[in-house]
Image (tube, rainbow, N blue to C red):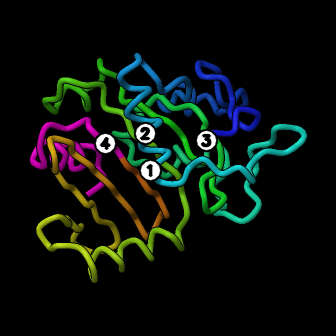
């Protein structure tokens, strides 16, 4: 991962957030322990998030060819209210499509975290790209096993939930907002993963 382009973990992302955002959508370090770091970084690498073209002389996190949501506030602003209120996020670098991604955890004391049963901090990476989200949904419908896919009623958002080799993988895409979410080795089974997505307001 490009260290020059990545803000130090534990640093506040945006100092210009509105009062409403600061109170409900606090954006700060997402990594709460070594286990969570390993989960999140592994997920980033598996998605091609280590984009070596992201770095600039000034260390800017501005995307050159990605989507339009390239600040932490803009990305968190696409979260459903329940997820936004509970999420703690910090910026990563740019992924392979040139989009800024965030490393996030769900506050363990939040109602959302306490509504699902898991032995780990709920950690995920997220970014926004509407075009890529639409492509992802089409790919899932055409190429994935139907039992792995859960869609909303309007078919504008879906989750791909798989449990294999004792590791769960949960992916989410929304073609309306462009929101992508992926999490690995967090939920003990597909039922828990789906319950989290529903209570977070994602599906």
Residue located at (52% from left, 52% from top): 127
Q: Would residue 48 be counted in the magenta stretch?
A: no
Q: Quadrant of the C terminus?
A: bottom left
The boundaries of the magenta stretch are: 183-203
Closest to the camera, between mark 4 and mark 1, is: 1
> Residue 159, relative to residue 1: is it above or below?
below
Residue at screen point 40% across, 64% down: 174
Question: Label 1: how many residues lie within 10 Å, few (<14), some (14-19) or many (20+)?
Answer: few
Q: Locate the N terminus by quadrant.
A: top right
Where disc 3 sits, the SS reads helix
Disc 2/disc 4 C-alpha distance (Å): 8 Å
Crowding near pointer 3: few (<14 within 10 Å), some, many (20+)?
Answer: many
Query: Is 199 placed above or below 6 here?
Result: below
Mark 3–mark 1 distance (CA, rounded to whole Å):
25 Å
Q: Which mark is residue 184?
A: 4
Residue drawn at x 16%, y 50% as measured from the top left: 163
Above or below: residue 81 compared with residue 3 = below
């Amino acid at each position: 991962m490009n260290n020059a382009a990545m803000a130090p973990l534990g640093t506040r992302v945006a100092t210009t957030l509105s009062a409403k955002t600061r109170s409900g959508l606090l954006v700060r370090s997402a990594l709460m322990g070594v286990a969570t770091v390993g989960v999140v970084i592994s997920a980033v690498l598996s998605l091609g998030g280590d984009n070596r073209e992201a770095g600039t002389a000034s260390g800017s996190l501005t995307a050159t060819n990605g989507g339009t949501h390239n600040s932490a506030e803009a990305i968190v602003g696409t979260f459903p209210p329940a997820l936004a209120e509970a999420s703690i996020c910090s910026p990563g670098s740019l992924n392979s499509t040139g989009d800024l991604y965030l490393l996030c955890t769900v506050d363990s004391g939040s109602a959302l975290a306490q509504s699902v049963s898991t032995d780990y901090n709920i950690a995920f990476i997220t970014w926004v790209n509407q075009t890529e989200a639409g492509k992802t949904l089409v790919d899932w419908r055409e190429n994935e096993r139907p039992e792995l896919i859960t869609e909303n009623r309007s078919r504008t958002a879906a989750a791909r939930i798989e449990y294999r080799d004792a590791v769960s993988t949960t992916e989410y895409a929304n073609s309306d907002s462009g929101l992508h979410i992926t999490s690995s080795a967090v939920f003990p089974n597909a039922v828990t993963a789906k319950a989290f997505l529903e209570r977070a307001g994602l599906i």
